[in-house]
Amino acid sequence: MGEPKRSEDIKTESSALPAGKKSAGKSPSGRSNKKIPFRRCVGCGESKPKKELIRVVRTPEADIILDPTGKKSGRGAYLCRDKACLRKAMKSKRLERSLETAIPAEVCESLERELEKSDENREE
Ligand SMILES: [Zn+2]
């Protein structure tokens, strides 16, 4: 009776690395042209880089608030950091239309105040 030869043990050494797990499809070379997202201000109607605008959001609780982070969930509209644009957006009802809700005057006033505040400690 001869011993069974186990040649399998050696096999692993020469086998190639599993392919297809390198990068997730994107080329690693950095793309230099970053696309800046533009949004349109509902007040003056100008398109500006998102960073220069401030988001107004209607939260799932139906509050209308400013969203300086731009990350809150809810229906949002963009405004210049300018009270004039907020007023314009209110007057033309474009803000209400964008948020698909009525905005009471007192909410508008508190938005104005928030806007002033966010303008003061705006990060450069
Ligand atoms: Zn504007």
Image (cartoon, helix red, strand yellow):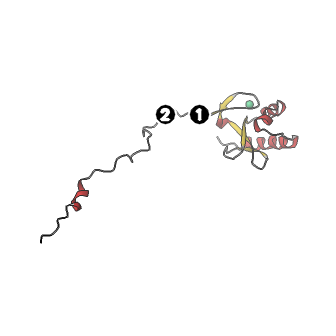
Callout 2 environment at 10 Å: few (<14), some (14 to 19), or many (20+)? few
Q: Amino acid at mark 2?
A: Ser
Q: In this view, which residue lies farthest toward the right?
A: 105
The residue to which callout 2 is attached is 32
Task: Dividing the image into four quarters, tell me where ligand 1 lies.
Answer: top right
Residue 53, image x, y percentages: 69, 36
Task: Please name the residue shown 12% across and 72% down the image.
Answer: 1
The residue to which callout 1 is attached is 36
Residue 13, image x, y percentages: 24, 56
The answer to whether the residue labelled 1 contacts the one labelled 2, judged by CB atoms less than 8 Å apart, is: no
Q: Amino acid at mark 1?
A: Ile
Question: Taking 114 as reference, is 11 above or below it?
Answer: below
- Give me the C-alpha separation between circle 1 and circle 2: 12 Å
Disc 1 on helix, strand or loop? loop
Assign the C terminus to one quadrant of the image: top right
Q: In this view, which residue lies farthest toward the bottom?
A: 1
Disc 2 on helix, strand or loop? loop
Could you say which disc has been placed on residue 69 in the image?
none
Question: Taking 24 as reference, is 89 above or below it?
Answer: above
